[in-house]
Image: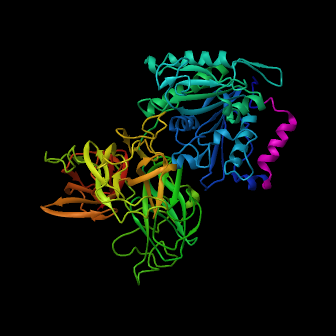
Amino acid sequence: MTENFRGSLSAVKRILLFLLLTAPAALAALGAAGAVPASVPGSREHIVYFEGTAQELEVYKIRGRLDGPTMMILGGVQGDEPGGFLSADLYVDTALKRGNLIIVPRANFKSIINFDRGSDGDMNRKFGDNVVLGDPDLGRVRIIKNLMAESDVFLNLHDGSGFFRNHWESDQANPSRYGQCLIADAETYVNSRGEELKLGQTARKAVEIVNRDIPDEAYKFRFANHDTLSPQSRHKDQRHSATFYALTQLGIPAYGIETSKQLPSLEMKIHQHNLAVNAFMELYGLELEQPRINLDPPELHFLVLSVNGGTRIAVEAGQKVFLSEGDTLEVLYVGANYTRGISVDVLNFGTLNDLKVPLKITRPTSILARKDNLLCGKIEVDFFPAGEARGHPLASAPALRPPAGGGAGFLPEAGSLPGVPPSLSSAGDSASAAGASDAPTASAAGASDAPSVPSPGTPRVTGTIGPPPPAPPGEAPQKKGRGFLLEIDGVPYELPAGETLKLNSEAKVRLVDFLNGEDLPQGTVLNLRGFVGRRGDATGNDKGTLLDGAKDLIPRFAVRREGRVLYRLGAENGPELLYAGYLDFQAPVLRSVTFELNGVEKTLPLAGRWKLAPGTRVRLKKVDLEGDLPLESPRFTLGGRPVSADLPQTLVMPDIAVSLAVFSGGILTGKVVLHP
């Protein structure tokens, strides 16, 4: 291995690399924002390719204070494997004593946002000579290959199914599974420089190091030699993978790190990825500190917006923005409790990632902010009522006044909002979110009345919604009296054929049976597209299985009709669809919050505002979600600080504006604002 930051590159290679990264034409073609690789000990560099698109690729280069080999860490090449890309993300914040890191936490950002394996096909099968010109992943694959060429060792982080075992133990633990193993493409490999790479020996040493910190025998790692070059290999498809390219084309040791998707928590997956990465660092001579795991729920604080290229303004999460039809809206900055993995989607305009993209708004919409595939928060965009246009700070006019009833806040004084880059605000053009000063506040639990939340037996369902989406050509007509028997959060529910059931995105659904199915043809199965109930069952029969709406659905198999994302539940006999119903999983959205002051109730809608004198004690009585969905595992924060989840409870109004944020499970449903 080399002992410097790609010191083994020839002078010609270094010159070519310098030209590639600095030539304006090359930068324009790649969409890069950055400079030449860092060369100063202890320095770090952040490069962004394809910025502001769903294909955005962020690269981090960290140089140690002392010379050592360069290790590349790749995460997120498959977007539904968060243990890998969240572990890689942690190493961005590390400092190195010895050696160097090249980190690509999110190789396939589009698939991460969609939380699927590959929105444009499996990216980890596009590193061979099989990729066609025009493939959406091709540009990023080329960049990653160039980064590999700067490296001395390559790690590819994944979450795999089940538990790898050398011999068959069960359906979830056998040689065909990938979870809890370190993978190499050969036991040993001699590269073009005549160096013998002892991959198996090194991986077994790493396994030994990792397993010291894994007490549960079932979760210990093993080494898996895919023997990819062999004609008898069961993994010939890996010849198009990133690790195979790094090994055979660049002659550097390359390993896949696979934690199991069946581990009991995301935190455990991340931690065990960290153990494996650290073990390889130890074996290859890199020294660093263990990064911190951060799994706080993502929360949007504000967006910095610009309309028609004019005034910049910060709009707090949950507020409404008013525009005139045809205005150009641009989201300049996202203020959230995370800074990486952030995307913005202006619904029905632009692409999956509209950050820093000017868009002409021709109808009301919503701006969704996401951290990876998780919703941080949203802001509604509407048009001015008749006669109100051009009187709002988000309209390009001299008069700066919010319309009656609220909307985005604006303060014309100099200064900037905490966390906003200086380039986004200046004297006379500052950004300020109404109620953004969420400082600590006092709160006290109220009387011990029964909480205003549904009883445990209440299913997370609002009933059927209609009219049903139009049936596709060839779908059988639905007969009255036919349908599906389900259990939703343990409660029986009947879904008539042809209708659609609206569910909380975290609901748990058991597919019990088909109603009145005595005369159905023999061999008819109950199949939910986008859900794998029994792995290895070729019939697709999901009868009797339980699905968790929060994690078991595969979005690419969903049906998209009339702006809704639906999962088809079908009674199928071979290729023939006899009857169909649809499940519509939706994230909970706050409708209103009800308070009581001096015996009088006041209800605030989503993003509503209420002026209260400092020190006022007000009772929080009730929270309602859109569609009458129940509030599951409720959590509240006031000014960013947790308060009791019991209802009713008493809150004390501080002397600054604060937001009351309402969470259902791990999802932020919305906020209301209390201000003095």
Res. 636 visible in picture: no
Where, quadrant-wise, is the C terminus in this rendering? bottom left
Residue at (82%, 38%) from the top-left corner?
Answer: 14
Q: How many marks?
A: 0
Q: Is residue 193 left or right of residue 456?
A: right
Res. 463 visible in picture: yes
Q: Is residue 616 magenta?
A: no
The relative height of residue 423 versus residue 492 in the rendered view (above or below) is below
Towards the viewer: 286 or 186: 186
Q: Please name the colour scheme applied to the rendered image.
A: rainbow
Where, quadrant-wise, is the N terminus in this rendering? top right
Q: Quadrant of residue 487?
A: top left
Q: Position of residue 627 (x, y in %)?
A: 30, 59
Towards the viewer: 593 or 163: 163
Residue at (49%, 75%) from the top-left corner?
Answer: 395
Q: Is residue 8 magenta?
A: yes
The relative height of residue 323 versus residue 602 in the rendered view (above or below) is below
Magenta span dominant secondary structure = helix
Q: Position of residue 195 (x, y in %)?
A: 79, 20
Q: Position of residue 304 (x, y in %)?
A: 50, 61
Residue interval drawn in magenta:
7-25
In the displayed image of the protein, which residue is found farthest to the bottom?
387
Q: Is residue 512 left or right of residue 375?
A: left
Q: Position of residue 230 (x, y in %)?
A: 72, 23
Residue at (46%, 61%) from the top-left corner?
Answer: 561
The relative height of residue 402 versus residue 588 in the rendered view (above or below) is below
Residue at (34%, 62%) from the top-left corner?
Answer: 607
